[in-house]
Structures are given as C-alpha cells and as structure tokens.
Image: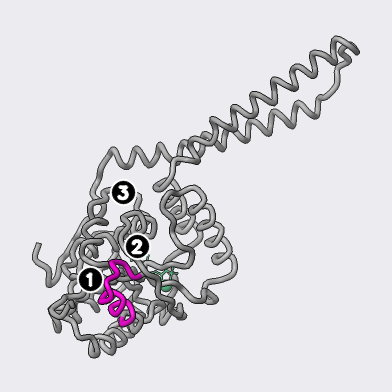
Amino acid sequence: MHEEALISIIAPMYNEEAAIDIFFAEMRKFLAECPYQYEIVCVNDGSKDNTLDILKKYAEEDNRIKVVSFSRNFGKERALYAGLKYSSGDAVIPIDVDLQNPPMTIKTFLAKWEEGYDIVYGVRENRKNEGRLRRFLSKKFYEFYNLISEQKAPYNAADFRLMDRKVVNAVLRIREKHLFMKGIFNWVGYKSCPVLYNHADRAAGNSKFNFWKLWNLALDGITGSSTLPLRVWTYLGGGIAFVSFVIALFFLIKTILWGDPVQGFPTLVILLLFFGGIQLIALGIMGEYIGRIMIEVKNRPLYIVDELINIDE
Ligand code: UDP
Ligand code: MG
C-alpha cells in the first residue's frame, strides 16, 4: 500500500550526549529491517553538552540524518513541533532518544498504518521506572484534563506514535505558543489506534523534566484545552451569594426575635480568610490565562533555528 513511502523519525534532544550513540545503534537495527525509505530528523534543543557535535558526525556520514539546531533550549514541545515542520515523510514518528520508547515498536506502528490508521499511538504498559509521585500526579492530571476538555487524551499515551502526513499537516496548522502536543495530537481527530509498549528504563543520562517543568506543562495542557477553570467562578460566586442571602435572612430573623449580643468573631475571621483565599485563587487562574494571552499576542516565533544540516529550507 505504501511501498514507496518515506518515513520520518523525529528525535528531540536536550543534553543527550550520553544517549545518542546507543540511540543510533538501536535505530540502525530497526532501520536495517525496515522496508521503507527513511530520514531521521534530530532536533537539538539548545544542548549545552556535546550533543550537537556528535550529531554533526552522524549527519556527515549519512545525509538521511538531518539536524535542526535551536539557538537555545525551547522545550520538548517546541522541538517536536520543529521536527514535524522539517520532516517530509508520509508517516512521521516522534521518539525519545533515551530509548524509553523501543524502536522495534515502530514495526507495529507501521503495520497498523498499512491497515489504514492515520494515528497509531504508543501506550505505556508500565511506568514503574518513573517514580511513584510522578505517576500519581500524572494520573490525577489526566483525570482532571479529561474531565474538563472536550477532546480526551488517553492516560499513559505517549508522544511516541506514528502520524500520517495528513495528521502532521493538520497539527502544523495549529499556531499556538503554549503547545501541549499530546492534547493537540488528539484535538486534530482522525482514525487512531493504540499500541501497547514496554516503557523501558532510560538508556543513559537523566530525565530532563523536573517537577516545575511538568507542572507548567500540565498548566499549558489545561489552559490550552478548556476555559472551564475561568468560568467556574461565576457559578461558585452565584452559589455563595445565594447562601449568604439565606444566612442574612437567618440573622435578621434571629436578631428580631432574640436581640443582638455580639458573637461570632471567629466565624468572621474564618469567613474572611476563606473568601480572601478563594478570590486569590480565582485571580491567579485568571492570571494564568491572561499571561498566556499576552504571550500569544506578542506572537514571537516558537523557536529560533541556529543551524540546519542536510535540510534545505
Ligand atoms: N527534551 C528536549 N527538550 C527539553 C527536554 C527534553 O528536546 O527541554 C527531549 C529529551 O532529550 C528526550 C525527550 O525530550 O529525547 C524526553 O525527555 P526525557 O527523557 O528527559 O523525559 P522523560 O522520559 O523523563 O519524560
Ligand atoms: Mg525519557
């Protein structure tokens, strides 16, 4: 069906000097058995180590290995976006270079693609290597995300997936600055199918995501997919106003019947603090959205490319 097809592997890299050689070695094992033409688009996301130099050596030997090098670190989501933009394959497969996504799984992706699926997404069978707290918070995030978003993002689904060219073109039409790729991949729609894979341990080096980065990614995901957190205050405020009206009535009647000895100082303090807190939360959430509007309005480029190797603009 896709005999002459070109497949693009997209590998975002940030300080991955320790993992690159193992990555290419594994990739070659897979590509040796792969019946399609291929290219590997490596996005160097502003690495401060020797990642770029090592990449250049590989690119020199083989012009199917392409390099997009950023002027600084712009984050994995933007690196992925650039990878999609500079790829030309009929099917595009983002993969982590730390080999947590086993390249051999791509065979199954390709078989499903041949069956006619436009998106074949990897689903992590286990996440034992990710730390209990991270797994727990990640699960909570997806529960919340799916509760408030129109388009669901399956829990445990990975960026590791195959997308047909038409899906990639659809994704590239999205021009927002706060990218949450997993959400976007689902938002565009198309016929999709999951494939379970074994999420391996990192081959070398350390995770590039700390708690703060993941937290902000989660906020990007939520603010990018739903305005419910903004709107919920109207209803909460309405509810509280109604309750306060009932309480006012109660105090009015109580005062008429029994007089008005001064009481309830602790209640006042608690209520004051409680509603002060609620209002600040509401303001803070508005701030999250307004800050993002500000970035969108400034409309700066998603990333700055410093160097392109084996790619003509
Ligand atoms: N990565 C990137 N830019 C970043 C952070 C990560 O391009 O700012 C790449 C990284 O080199 C790796 C992939 O994204 O290829 C996944 O990162 P990592 O393995 O550190 O994340 P984790 O597996 O812990 O989620
Ligand atoms: Mg990893």
> Number of numbered discs present?
3
In terms of image quadrants, where is residue 234? top right
Instruction: Find disc 1 in the rendering and name its residue.
Output: 91
Distance from mark 2 CB to nearest ligand 1 atom below 8 Å: yes
Left or right of 76, for residue 213: right
Instruction: Find disc 3 in the rendering and name its residue.
Output: 177
Instruction: Find disc 2 in the rendering and name its residue.
Output: 76
Q: Residue at point 72% right, 29% down? A: 271
Tell me: residue 293, above or below residue 44.
above
The crowding category of the residue bearing disc 2, from other C-alpha atoms within 10 Å (few below 14, some 14 to 19, many at least 20), is many
Say which amino acid is labelled 2. Answer: Lys
Quadrant position of ligand 2: bottom left
Residue 130 x, y percent position in the rendering: 52, 72
Q: Does residue 297 appear in this view?
A: yes
Which one is in front in this view, the residue at disc 2 or the one at disc 1? 1
Tell me: residue 133, above or below residue 212.
below
Left or right of 309, for residue 205: right
* Range shown magenta: 107-120
Q: Give me the C-alpha separation between circle 3 and circle 1.
A: 24 Å
The crowding category of the residue bearing disc 3, from other C-alpha atoms within 10 Å (few below 14, some 14 to 19, many at least 20), is many
Say which amino acid is labelled 1. Answer: Ala
Q: What is the image's colouring? A: one colour
In terms of image quadrants, where is residue 248? top right
Residue 105 x, y percent position in the rendering: 36, 81
The local secondary structure at tag 2 comes to helix
**Quarter placement of the N terminus:** bottom left
Q: Give me the C-alpha separation between circle 2 and circle 1.
A: 20 Å
The local secondary structure at tag 3 comes to loop
Left or right of 245, for residue 113: left
